[in-house]
Image: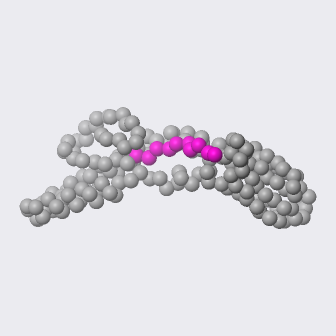
Amino acid sequence: IAAVDKSVDIVQMFWPGIDPNYYFKFSLPYIVNPDTEINTVKVIIDGKSYELGKLEDIGNVAVETFKVKEPVIFLKSITRSVIKGIAAEAAKDKIKEKNPGIAGSLMSFATDVAVYASENADLRISRFFPNDILVADIPLTEGKHFIVLEYYDSNGNMLLRDDKGMIEISKDKLNLVESWNIR
């Protein structure tokens, strides 16, 4: 077993009916809670500043959820890889049978390359989770208010100013202003 960027505990498995010389590539996903440059977010309404508070650390929630599901994810990934590897070996046997010599060897090699290239860990959702959700409950009167959000690092340097402009506030609806900064 070879690992690219993470240590792997080697577990030997005996699978009845599978030749011990078969080659399988497993791409196993893992999750890390990324660091953020953002330390403070302020919302400025009509010139008055409010600091947002953390509602939830979704990064930690995602990591803990992944840890719970990790054994099932790994089992599915390994099973998929083994099935692909067995199918590839069967295809290579047929290729070599119909094309003896160097042509069959080249086509067999191409099959191995295709199987290798097609094996990737499933990373579809994990990249798009926000790390933190920050909120503030700010009482405002009905009408239009000028709203700006400012993102700061731990040294107090402004990273982003998100000018929302004039926002209509109404007592008959949820008055939610969204902003995000991917850092």
Could one spot residue 108 in this view of the protein? yes
**In the rendered view, would you say 67 is above or below 141?**
above
In the rendered image, the residue lying farthest to the left is: 101
Q: Position of residue 34 (x, y in %)?
A: 56, 44
Q: Position of residue 21 (x, y in %)?
A: 19, 44
Observer-nearest of 142 and 98: 142
Which residue corresponds to the image point at 37% horizontal and 36% vertical from the top-left?
8
Q: Position of residue 171 (x, y in %)?
A: 88, 60
State which region is magenta. Answer: 28-37
Observer-nearest of 178 and 68: 178
**In the rendered view, would you say 179 is above or below 63?**
below
Could one spot residue 79 in this view of the protein? no
Q: Position of residue 92 (x, y in %)?
A: 18, 58
Is 83 positioned to the left or the right of 141 in the image?
A: left
Observer-nearest of 179 and 158: 158
Is 153 positioned to the left or the right of 62 in the image?
A: right
Q: Is residue 36 magenta?
A: yes
Which residue corresponds to the image point at 10% horizontal and 61% vertical from the top-left?
102
